[in-house]
C-alpha cells in the first residue's frame, strides 16, 4: 500500500471534484496519510481528515438553489457580501468541530494575511477556524480577524499548496488542481461548455446575470474574474513545476462553474474519473 500526501486546490464548487478523487484513491488501495488544502480544498480535506467525508457528501447532495439561498447571510458591510456564519454553523451540525492536532491524519489549511501579503498555515487549533479563514473569498465572505491579522482565501497567494504537502506524511505526493487551463481553443467546445453553464447556472450567477445587459460579454465583473483566473492558473502551474508531484489531476477551470454547489454528484464523479485516469498513467 502506498502512503499519499494529498494536496487539494482552491476553486469554489469545482472543488467538489476533490471528493471523487479521494474516493478513487481509497478504492484503489492508497492510504492518505496527510492533506494540505486551500479554500474548497481545505474544506473537503478537513471533512476527510475528520473521518466524515461521506456525511459531508450526503449533505451536499441535499443542496439545491433554495437551500443555497437559505445559507446566504447577507451583510451590509462595505468589504463583503456574505457573513459566512450560516454555512459554518450548518456544517458543524453534521461534522462537529475538533482540534486539528487531534485529527487521525496530518492536516494543514492555507489562508492569506491580507495586510502583510503572507501565507498563514493552520496546523493546529480549531478545524473550522482554519477552514473559515481559508475559504474567505475576498469581497464575498467576511475576512477572519485573528491575532492582529485579516485573513482571506488562501488561493490569493497559493491556490495549490504543494509547498506544505511536500513536507507532510506520505511517500507519494498527489495533487488535485481544479483550476487548470481552460478547455477549448476549438470554438465548438467553447460553445458547448457555455451552453451547459447557462443551463445549470447557480443562484448567485443568475442574480449577477440579471444585472448585466444581455450580450455584454466584456464587463467589469467578467474582466476581473478572468484576470483572477489567469493569476490562479499561473500560480498553480508554477507550484507544480517547482514541487513536481508524483500524480497531478488537472481539471480545467471552465469545466464547471465556481458556484455549482448543487451539482455534487456530477462534479465528484468527474473528479473520480480524472483521478482514475491519472493513476493509470503512472
Image: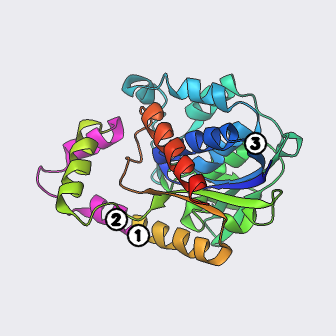
Prevalent SS, magenta region: helix
Numbered disc 3: secondary structure: helix
Please say if 172 is above or below 131: below
The residue shown at (70%, 61%) is 149
Please say if 282 is above or below 68: below
Residue that mark 2 sits on:
226
Mark 2 → mark 1, Cα distance in angstroms: 6 Å
Mark 3 → mark 2, Cα distance in angstroms: 31 Å
Mark 2 nearby-residue class (10 Å; few <14, some 14–19, many ≥20): few
Taking the image as shown, residue 18 lies to the left or right of residue 82, namely right
Query: Which comes before the other along the chain, label 1 or label 3?
Result: 3
Residue that mark 3 sits on:
127
Mark 1 → mark 3, Cα distance in angstroms: 30 Å
Is label 2 in contact with label 1 (beta carbons under 8 Å)? yes
Report the mark closest to the observer, 1 or 3: 1
Is label 3 in contact with label 2 (beta carbons under 8 Å)? no
Taking the image as shown, residue 53 lies to the left or right of residue 195, namely right
Residue that mark 1 sits on:
230
Give the camera-side residue of 106 and 282: 282
- Quadrant location of the C terminus in the rendered image: bottom right
| Image-quadrant location for residue 272 | top right
Q: Kindly tell me whether residue 9 is visible in this rendering.
A: no
Query: Which comes before the other along the chain, label 3 or label 2?
Result: 3
Mark 3 nearby-residue class (10 Å; few <14, some 14–19, many ≥20): many
Give the camera-side residue of 121 and 176: 176
Q: Would residue 226 be counted in the magenta stretch?
A: yes
Amino acid at each position: 500500500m502506498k502512503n499519499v500526501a494529498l494536496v487539494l486546490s482552491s476553486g469554489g464548487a469545482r472543488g467538489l471534484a476533490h471528493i471523487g478523487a479521494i474516493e478513487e484513491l481509497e478504492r484503489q488501495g492508497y492510504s492518505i496519510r496527510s492533506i494540505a488544502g486551500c479554500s474548497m480544498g481545505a474544506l473537503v480535506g478537513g471533512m476527510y481528515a475528520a473521518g466524515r467525508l461521506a456525511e459531508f457528501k450526503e449533505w451536499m447532495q441535499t443542496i439545491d438553489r433554495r437551500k443555497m439561498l437559505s445559507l446566504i447571510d447577507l451583510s451590509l458591510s462595505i468589504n463583503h457580501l456574505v457573513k459566512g456564519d450560516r454555512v459554518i454553523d450548518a456544517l458543524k451540525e453534521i461534522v462537529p468541530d475538533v482540534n486539528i492536532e487531534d485529527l487521525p491524519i496530518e492536516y494543514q489549511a492555507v489562508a492569506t494575511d491580507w495586510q502583510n501579503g503572507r501565507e498563514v498555515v493552520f496546523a493546529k487549533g480549531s478545524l473550522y477556524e482554519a477552514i473559515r479563514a481559508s475559504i474567505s473569498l475576498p469581497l464575498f465572505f467576511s475576512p477572519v480577524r485573528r491575532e492582529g491579522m485579516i485573513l482571506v482565501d488562501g488561493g490569493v497567494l497559493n491556490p495549490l499548496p504543494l509547498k506544505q504537502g511536500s513536507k507532510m506524511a506520505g511517500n507519494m505526493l498527489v495533487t488535485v488542481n481544479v483550476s487548470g487551463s481552460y478547455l477549448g481553443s476549438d470554438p465548438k467546445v467553447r460553445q458547448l461548455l457555455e451552453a451547459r453553464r447557462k443551463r445549470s447556472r447557480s443562484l448567485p450567477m443568475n442574480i449577477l446575470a440579471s444585472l448585466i445587459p444581455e450580450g455584454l460579454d466584456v464587463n467589469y465583473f467578467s474582466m476581473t474574474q478572468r484576470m483572477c483566473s489567469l493569476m490562479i492558473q499561473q500560480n498553480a502551474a508554477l507550484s507544480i513545476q517547482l514541487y513536481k508531484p508524483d500524480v497531478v489531476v488537472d481539471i480545467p477551470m471552465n469545466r464547471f462553474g465556481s458556484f455549482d454547489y448543487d451539482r455534487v454528484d456530477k462534479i465528484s464523479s468527474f473528479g473520480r474519473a480524472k483521478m482514475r485516469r491519472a493513476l493509470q498513467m503512472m
